[in-house]
Image: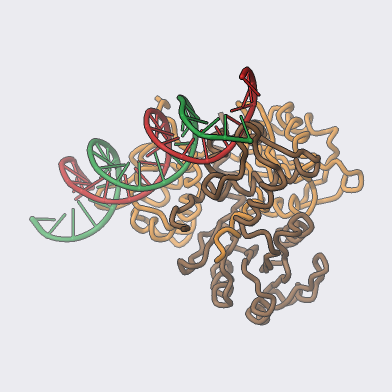
Chain colours: A brown, B orange, C red, D green
DNA sequence: TAGATTGTTAATCGATTAACAATC
DNA sequence: TAGATTGTTAATCGATTAACAATC
């Protein structure tokens, strides 16, 4: 019955809902309306209701959404109800920074391995993870059942790293290198590029 | 005559064009077609032509676009033809990582000041920049004519930092904290959030 | 019950793509 | 000239928003 195609725009909003719902839950808020969510997240309430309705009837008319129930449902939709093992290549400043999010991502995702091509980085400790050489990538990824790969190497090496990820069976890639990487269509890639982000902001200066 | 509103989607693609054109220029490629660009950037050639045509007639029929001329034009459109001073708050791992992009961003943008609220960070050196206390933020930003602010502090402090940026006259903000920040409508905010990015990727796992 | 809020349909709005005359 | 490629219009596709019956 998964015939209706969910647009990327919808999928990108789900984690934003989830994050705010988690905040509400921490404050012991029981119920929230699409109105409330809209105000806090700068979104149209109708859009929020529609987004959620793609996946089921999670609310109660006249009441709103049960916070904890909706959290549970969104986590299921995003497949975040089990910890997803993640690997990262590029133990530079950025890679190191992302490893620090491990605590924040707990219950959802976990960076379980860090790799680097540079000799002098290997063996270094980042957040209790020892940096491993690229030669061990395939083996480690398969053993740890890594499903998502993060690329934080310079642009010149990013495509090679992507190829290695694909080859080792990773299903999705988050690329931070300033370059469009190419992968087979069954692998999902998102680009998270600080430099293009910053440059597009400049357009809006007066 | 700036009556036609340019969509955000268009503006976000311009830096991607620019980046690839710069690569071509470095390889001494003189001319490029929308076809070529489309293949390399995974975009529809008609879309690329239309994007560029919003701003002028930059190509030659039957020939394509002159690489260096198009670079010049896109830099003008994005207001990147002069160096834009940028400030960053949050001298943690992520802040430090972003400062390293200064070299890459040369000619376009420059991080000219770094601030942190924590005593022990102040005075530290990052990429030849001394970390300054928050008390100096307004003064430094006004003196250095900073136009864009980057937020790399924990979520709990991000809104306060945004308020300080706005108060000191910053025109646009790039927020890396996992939280939607609120600013007056004349200030432009982009959210660059690693955690939501990663979570939305999970949806596409089988 | 009265008030609130969902889920959903229809209307609107906007973005992408196809097609082609113009022309280098 | 013949082939290539732009700039642009029209067609398509998709996403957002408004409106409201259903109902808690």
Residue B50 visible at all? yes
**Residue A61 occupies quadrant:** top right
Q: Is residue A120 above or below residue A150?
A: below
Q: Nearer the viewer, residue A157 or B21?
A: A157
Q: Residue at x 51, y 39 (%)?
A: B78
Q: Is residue A51 left or right of residue B184?
A: left
**Depth check, front residue: A103 or B190:** A103
- The residue located at (58%, 69%) in the rendering is A157
Residue A107 x/y as whole percent: 74, 59
Q: Residue at x 54, y 50 (%)?
A: A55
- Image location (x, y in percent) of residue B56: 36, 37
Image side of residue B57 versus residue B193, left or right: left
Above or below, comparing residue B90 to residue D19 in the picture: below
In the foreground, B31 or B171: B171
User: In screen coordinates, is B77 left or right of C2?
Assistant: left
- Snapshot quadrant of residue A60: top right
Residue B48 seen in this snapshot: no
Dividing the image into 4 quarters, which one contains the C terminus of chain A?
top right
Q: Going 71% across and 46% down the picture, which residue do you hit?
A: B178
Where residue A176 sits: x, y (%)? Answer: 61, 58
Residue ranking furthest to the right: B120
């Amino acid at each position: 019955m998964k015939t209706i195609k969910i647009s990327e725009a919808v999928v990108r909003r789900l984690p934003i809902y989830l994050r705010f719902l988690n905040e509400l839950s921490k404050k012991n808020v029981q119920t929230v309306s699409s109105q409330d969510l809209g105000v806090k997240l700068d979104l149209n309430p109708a859009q929020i209701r529609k987004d959620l309705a793609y996946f089921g009837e999670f609310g109660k008319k006249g009441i709103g959404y049960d916070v904890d129930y909706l959290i549970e449902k969104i986590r299921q939709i995003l497949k975040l109800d089990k910890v997803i093992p993640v690997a990262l290549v590029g133990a530079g400043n950025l890679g190191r920074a992302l490893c620090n999010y491990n605590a924040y991502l707990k219950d959802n995702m976990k960076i379980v391995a860090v790799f680097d091509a540079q000799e002098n980085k290997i063996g270094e400790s980042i957040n209790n993870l020892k940096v491993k050489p690229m030669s061990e990538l395939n083996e480690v990824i398969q053993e740890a059942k890594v499903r998502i790969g993060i690329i934080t190497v310079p642009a010149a090496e990013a495509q090679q790293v992507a190829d290695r990820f694909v080859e080792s069976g990773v299903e999705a890639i988050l690329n931070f290198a300033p370059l469009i990487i190419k992968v087979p269509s069954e692998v999902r890639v998102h680009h998270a590029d600080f430099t293009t982000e910053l440059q597009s902001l400049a357009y809006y200066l007066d």
